[in-house]
Image: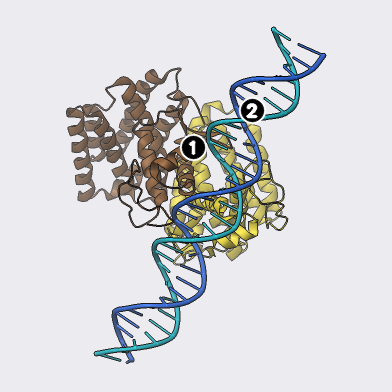
Chain colours: A brown, B yellow, C cyan, D blue
Amino acid sequence: MSGGAKDRAGGSVLARVPKSTFRAHIADGLRAAILNGDIEPGAQVVETTLADQFGVSRGPLREAMRQLIDEGLLVAVPYTGTHVVGLSVDDVREIYSMRVTLEIFAFEQIWARRDQAFRQGLVARHDALTACIDAQDDAASIVAELQLHGFVYEATGHKLLIRTWDSIRGRLQLYWAAHHRAHGIRGPRRDGHDRYVEMALSDDLAALKVEITDHMARGGRQTEEFLRGRPVGAVAD
Amino acid sequence: MSGGAKDRAGGSVLARVPKSTFRAHIADGLRAAILNGDIEPGAQVVETTLADQFGVSRGPLREAMRQLIDEGLLVAVPYTGTHVVGLSVDDVREIYSMRVTLEIFAFEQIWARRDQAFRQGLVARHDALTACIDAQDDAASIVAELQLHGFVYEATGHKLLIRTWDSIRGRLQLYWAAHHRAHGIRGPRRDGHDRYVEMALSDDLAALKVEITDHMARGGRQTEEFLRGRPVGAVAD
DNA sequence: CAATGATCGATTGTTGACAATCTGCGCGCA
DNA sequence: TGCGCGCAGATTGTCAACAATCGATCATTG
C-alpha cells in the first residue's frame, strides 16, 4: 500500500492491509503474539527480527513497540534491548486492586442508566462466558471474561475510564494467559460470575460492591499461589 | 551526540543533550509548550516544523508526538494532521470524576501507612501551594497543586495507580492552564486545601472521602461554568 | 592468577529521501 | 448557477542506510 512494502505475503500475522496505517496492525499482531504466548515473558524482542517477520521496516515497528511499552507489555532499555515484561506478585496484586476500584466506579457511573440494552448485553456476554467454561475452552474463556467486564466499562460511556481499562487489560490478559499455560485449567468458575451478573442487574449497589471486592479477592488469591516467588518473566519494570 | 544532529544550539527548548535518547526530551519540551499555552488547543502541530524547531529529524519527533497522543494531549488524523486536543465539558467532567475515584483509592491504599515522612511531605507541599496562592502566582500554583496530589499517589507506591495518574495529569493541567489564561485567576482557594490536608492527616477516612468528593465537585462546577458550550479547542477526541 | 583495557558483535537511535493519502480549489459542463 | 472531476499542495507514512551505544569476550599486564 505504501512506502515501498510491496506485498508482504510473508508477514506472520497481518493478512490484509486495511486502508490505513501499519502501526496499529503491527501493534495488534505483536500484542496477540505476546498474549498468546508465542513470545514468552522475559524473552527479548528484536526490532530487526520483528520487522522482517511483519514485512515492514523498523520505523513503523518501533512505533508499535513503543505503544506496547506504554501498555506495559514490553520493557525497553536504551541501546540495549527490549523484553516482554515479567509480572511479579506485586504487579498482579496491583492489577486486581485497581480493577476493584475501577469496576465499582464503572457501576456507580452506569447504575441509574442500566436500560434493557445493557441488561441484555450483559447477559449475552455472561452466557458466552458460561459456554466457554462449560466447554472447558480456557483460551476462549479468557477472551470472554475480558469482554464481559469490558462491556461494563464501555457501557459507562466514560472515555477516560475506558481508556484506563484498556491500559490495564493487556497486563491482566498477559497474566491470565501465562497462568493458563502453566496450570492448564484457569480460574473463572461459573458460580462466581453468576453472582456477579445477578447482582449487577439487581437494585443493591452496595451488595454488588462487596461481590466485586470478593470476586477480585478470589482471583487474586488463587493468583498469588501460582506466582509466589517466581515472576512470570525475568524482567520487571 | 548521535545520528547526525551535531549541535542543535537553535533548538527552542532543549539545552543539553542528556546522554540518552532524544525522544523523552522532545516529548517533555513539546508537552511543556502545549501546557504553557505556546501552542493553543486546537492548533495544528506539523511534524516537519517541530522537527526543525527541535533540531532533530522526524523519526524521534514522531515517537514523541505519539507519546503525547497516548497522554491525550494531541489528536492525530492519519495522513491529514495532528492537533492539540480541545477539551469539552464532558472531558473535564470525566477527569474530575476519575480523580475522585483514584484519589480515594490512593488514600485507602496508604491509610494505615501514613508515617511521619508522609505527613511531613504532605504538609510541605501544602505549604508550598499556600505560598503560591498567597503570592497570587497562578502558574506556580497549578504546578504546586499537581505536586501536592501527585505526592499522595507516589506515596502509595502503587505503580499502576501512579501510571494512571500520570495519564490523566496532562489533560488536567491542560485544562487548568487554559482556564487560567482565559479567566486570569484560577481556582485553588486556601480553605479548600486546608480542609483537604487536615482530613488527610486525621483518623476519619470516611470524612476524607466526603471532602475529596466535595473538593472535586467544587473544582468541577467552577470548571463547567467556564467551559459551557465552548470547548477549549477545536478538535475533540 | 586477578584486574584492566581494547575490540567486536549485536541492538537500538537517527537521518534524509521517497511514496501514499487527504483536502481544498479551480475548471468544465449541464 | 450548481455540481462533479481532477489537479496541486500540504502532511503524514514508510523505507533503507548510517551512527552511537552497550555487553561480552579476550588479550595484556602487574
B187 or A106, nearer to the observer: A106
Q: Are marks 1 and 2 on the same chain?
A: yes
Q: Chain of mark 2?
A: B
Residue carrying label 1: B161
Where disc 2 sits, the SS reads helix
Question: At label 2, which amino acid type do we have?
Answer: Gln
Q: Is residue A8 left or right of residue B158?
A: left
Residue A110 appears in the picture as rendered: yes
Category of crowding for the residue at label 1, using alpha-carbon neighbours closer than 10 angstroms: few (below 14), some (14–19), many (at least 20): many
Which residue is at 44% across, 67% downward?
A: B229
Residue B186 appears in the picture as rendered: no
Residue carrying label 2: B116
Q: Is residue A146 above or below residue B83?
A: above
Q: Is residue B42 above or below residue A57?
A: below
> Percent from the top left, x then y, of residue B36?
62, 58
Q: Quadrant of residue A149?
A: top left
Rounded to the nearest whole Å, what is the CA distance between mark 1 and mark 2? 22 Å
In which quadrant of the rendered image does the N terminus of chain A lie?
bottom left
Of the residues tagged 1 and 2, which is closer to the observer?
1
Question: At label 1, which amino acid type do we have?
Answer: Leu
Q: Report the number of numbered marks.
A: 2
> Percent from the top left, x then y, of residue A147?
28, 40
